[in-house]
Amino acid sequence: MSPPAQAPLRLLIVEDDPVYERILRAHLGRLGDRVGEIDHAGRVEDGLRQHRASPADLVLLDLTLPDSLPEATLERVAEFAERGAAVLVLSALDDPEVAEGARAAGALGFLDKGKISSERLAEAMDKVGAHGPAPQGAAPEAPPRRELGPDHPQRLAAQLVHDGKSWLTNHSFRLAALKRAAGPEAEGLIEGLGDTARALADLLDAGRGLVVDETTPVELLPVDLAPWVAAWKERRSASGGADVRVQTPDGSSLLLTCCPAGLEVALGALVENAEQAAGDGPVVVDLRATVDTDGSVQVEVTDSGGSWGAEDAGRLTDAFQKVERGSTRAGLGLYRARRWMERMGGSLDLVPREDTPGAMTVRLRFRAA
């Protein structure tokens, strides 16, 4: 016997941008009778007031609201969940720390506002019906975040990127509507404008990343590589992605000296580049660690993503270098990885692989612990 159909869900959209509210309603409108009544609030306090008066099954909660900055909004997730709602956190900032913080706060999940779709909303609604609200504390614990003042460069950069990407998301929504109305004769031009918007969004994210890197203190600590990677993989697992494997001498514990924030940026850039190059196919990233005679730790990173598409391997770590692996974004990722390795007292080198023409092994060298 097939399971009973899910009853229509009552939704609450907490979003201050009227254009993005229309975007959400348009996507939800494609889900038919799965969606029941939809309420809306433009502030978190108004959303909680409406939810107390008429509880929602699913809350679509924007992180940055007129009466609540992202950190404060995450603290309110539990208040929605206490009255039975599942919470899907939305943000224009495509930030792994934000995603981890949302899940750690008890949210059902996190979605980049620029990547919203009817399919992703339907997946979230499936989880509401199958599992109910995510229990608070079920997600892997996120690393502690530093408290930032209102004028800190990282906070200002985040606000600029948030506002810029919100505009680009709205722009892309209008382009999609124009494409449907204009017909096939304008399809190529409109798709080109959409590609431009996506490229600008990538550059905004990368620029914010550079600001975060250069304003994050380098706090060197001894880190046991394999357990650290395992915990990092668990935090990334919600979004799927590459299978990252670690090999240490004799499978033993291996300590290296690094700043965990820098290690996360460096390794994350390498894995993301491999995922972009592999497209929809599976990708494996192997980390092979050895100890040199001087006591330093060398980690060779290879992946199944294929060629880097660059004739001069030495220029791959230059900022804004264009290569096939995600074009400019890949070059910025490698630049950020190299800068962090240098700031931690180590190095990053690219070594051509003999087994795959155009492919590279990334060699990371860390100070001994």
Image (tube, helix red, strand yellow):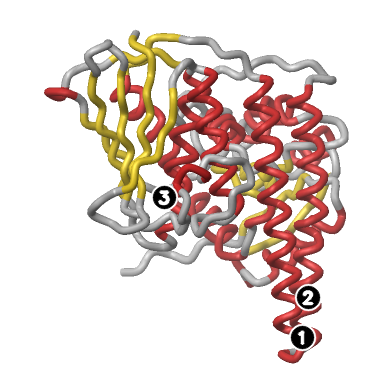
Q: Residue, x 71% and y 72% (percent of image)?
A: 192
Quick one: quadrant of the N terminus? bottom left
Q: Which residue is mark 1?
A: 186
Pick the front one: 290 or 93 = 290
Three-letter amino acid code of the residue under disc 2: Ala
Mark with earlier residue (2, 3): 2
Residue 177's disc number: 2
Question: For mark 2, does the 10 Å Cα neighbourhood hold few (<14), some (14 to 19), or many (20 or more) residues?
Answer: few
Q: Nearer the viewer, mark 2 or mark 3?
A: 3
Instruction: Give the residue type that dot 1 points to.
Output: Ala
Q: Quadrant of residue 235?
A: top left
Disc 1 and disc 3 in contact, CB within 8 angstroms: no
Labels 1, 3: front one: 3
Does residue 109 show up? yes
Which element is circle 3 on? Answer: helix
42 left or right, relative to 343? right
**Lower sequence index among marks 1 and 2:** 2
